[in-house]
Image (cartoon, rainbow, N blue to C red):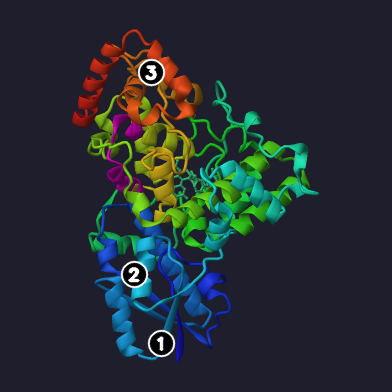
Amino acid sequence: MTDVVLLPYDRLSLSHSAMAGAAPKTTEILLIESEQMLRSRTWHAQRLFLLLSASAHVEQELRSQGYTVHSISAPSMRAGIEAFRREHPDARIRCTQPSSSSSQRALLEYGVELVPDDTFLTSREEFRAWAGDRRPLVMETFYRWQRTRLGILVEHGAPVGGTWNLDKENRLPPPKGAHPWPEPLRHEPDDIDERVWQSIIDRELPITGAAPNGTWATTRAGALRQLAYFLDTSLVDFGPYEDAMPRDSWSVNHSLLSPYLNLGLITAREVVDAVVERFHQGGIPLASAEGFIRQVIGWREYVNGVYWLFEDNYRNSNELRADRPLLPLLSEPSQTKMACASSVVSDVMDRGWAHHIPRLMVLSNLALIAGVRPQEFLDWMKAMFIDAADWVMVPNVIGMGLHADGGAMMTKPYAAGGAYVKRMGRFCSGCVYDPGKRVGETACPLTTLYWDFLDRNRATLKGNHRMAQQFAGLDRLSDLDDVRARARDVLDGLSAGTI
Ligand SMILES: Cc1cc2nc3c(=O)[nH]c(=O)nc-3n(C[C@H](O)[C@H](O)[C@H](O)COP(=O)(O)OP(=O)(O)OC[C@H]3O[C@@H](n4cnc5c(N)ncnc54)[C@H](O)[C@@H]3O)c2cc1C
């Protein structure tokens, strides 16, 4: 029986999970390029390029190590596996657990054996056991459990520095005036990159957004370079500015490691160990080290756990019955005069990336308070972001961003008016809209829609005690009828691309 490892585009680790223990003498490799998948949606050009080029680099690496690599182009994954089985009837095919429940079902149906994905620090079973009957699943509780059981920044069972959470030292707005933000690292294309990009063009694959521009690496070596660069230039100030949205830096002090983590080019353990080691060497504030580690061993693992715990129906949730079609500004930033939305969508078009606050408090917040259909917004986010994967987009969009799950993940909606964006960003000066106004032609659409959202969803959200303050604020509004009228104009204008 031939031992074969199937390596999908986003399961590219050569040492973990299905590849653990593999060797050229005993293992053959199967790569399947599915035409159905390539043409399933209009992809951000850089995302599709990253998937194809990272896979092509892995293929070259495996061949150079002496592996037999079967590289198949097929109409679909199923057709590819069937064609391979016809040629190799004795093959036993295994694959790392895929990144979406639909792929998982499909691979099992095609007779592929699934190997647990050990690039996460928490297996799906461990998360399930932790979750048990607990509801809500509070991230902070999970994070402290992670820190303790993994022994990360913990001494004698207590957090280093005496406190688990240093958020109060973080979350600063962008500094006033010029600030020496780290210059993002450039990743120069090699021959494989050039060839892959040319084939995307030649085959007229469905793409949008800017062509690859050196923002993203396509190899493990590039991912390691990015990690080293982050440690040297950005970790020190990661904490204070992790939520800031300046205009003079798109990357701020973020690591830009998510695509590589999600493809398996680098692991959470490698990243966390490197950050802890750098912290112990000195010169890195605890608030920055802790703030970063919280993202990786807390949020990332929690989101993965939630996805596999809630599974299929979760993605279709729409508890707030939002039914507005996708806003035109998401495909064309010039379709809005809102400086924040247009700037963030332009950034996404340029690089397939924006940090967690523009994703949450600009894009998702706008979709939430405008009542955009969650599944349409989810599809757009999945197509446009460089690090998108079902396991990470579904909880972040359906649960955290749009509260479409009715609070199964986050206890209250992340709904905010223009004041938040004004405090944490530098978009508002020069914008035609005023975040301090909720009515009138120059009222900030976010501010108007925030109040209108509370008003529209009063019946559903009123019972949530964490929303009491917000509803008390709504009850104090003396101009609610005017707000409602302005909200109707704003919603019509957003749909028409004139706001
Ligand atoms: C609506 C929404 C959608 C998102 N979609 C994705 C997605 O498709 N893919 C993705 O990897 N992240 C997603 N995130 C999380 C987060 O925005 C990105 O991980 C982060 O911006 C990536 O940039 P970075 O590597 O510089 O992250 P850093 O800020 O440097 O953080 C370090 C790492 O922490 C992890 N992380 C932090 N927050 C989260 C989170 N909420 N969920 C999962 N991992 C997290 C990421 O692996 C990230 O690389 C989403 C967040 C929101 C609010």
Position of residue 59 in the picture relative to residue 175 (left or right): left
Provide the residue designation for mark 3. Answer: 430
In percent of width and height, residue 373 lies at 27, 40
- Dominant secondary structure of the magenta stretch? helix
Query: How many numbered discs, if any?
Result: 3
Q: Secondary structure at mark 2?
A: helix
Res 56 label: none
Q: Nearer the viewer, residue 216 or 154?
A: 154
Q: Secondary structure at mark 1?
A: strand
Position of residue 398 in the picture relative to residue 38 (left or right): right
- Asked whether the beta carbons under mark 1 and mark 2 sit within 8 Å of each other, the answer is no
> How far apart are the two marked residues, 1 and 3, measured between alpha carbons?
63 Å
Q: Nearer the viewer, residue 298 or 13?
A: 298
Q: Nearer the viewer, residue 95 or 306?
A: 306
Q: Please, what is the three-letter code of the amino acid marked with disc 3?
A: Gly
Ligand 1: does it lie within 8 Å of the C-beta at label 1?
no
Q: Please, what is the three-letter code of the amino acid marked with disc 1?
A: Ala
In percent of width and height, residue 87 lies at 32, 89
Q: Quadrant of the C terminus?
A: top left
In percent of width and height, residue 202 lies at 24, 63
> Which residue sits at x=25%, y=39%?
326
443 w.r.t. 45: above or below: above
Q: Report the magenta residues as a range.
A: 366-383
Res 106 label: 2
Query: Which of the two marks, 1 or 2, is nearer to us in this view?
Result: 2
Q: Please, what is the three-letter code of the amino acid marked with disc 2?
A: Ala
165 w.r.t. 275: above or below: above
Query: Can residue 4 be seen in this snapshot?
Result: yes
Provide the residue designation for mark 1. Answer: 91
> How far apart are the two marked residues, 3 and 2, measured between alpha carbons?
51 Å
Name which quarter of the figure residue 401 lies in. top left
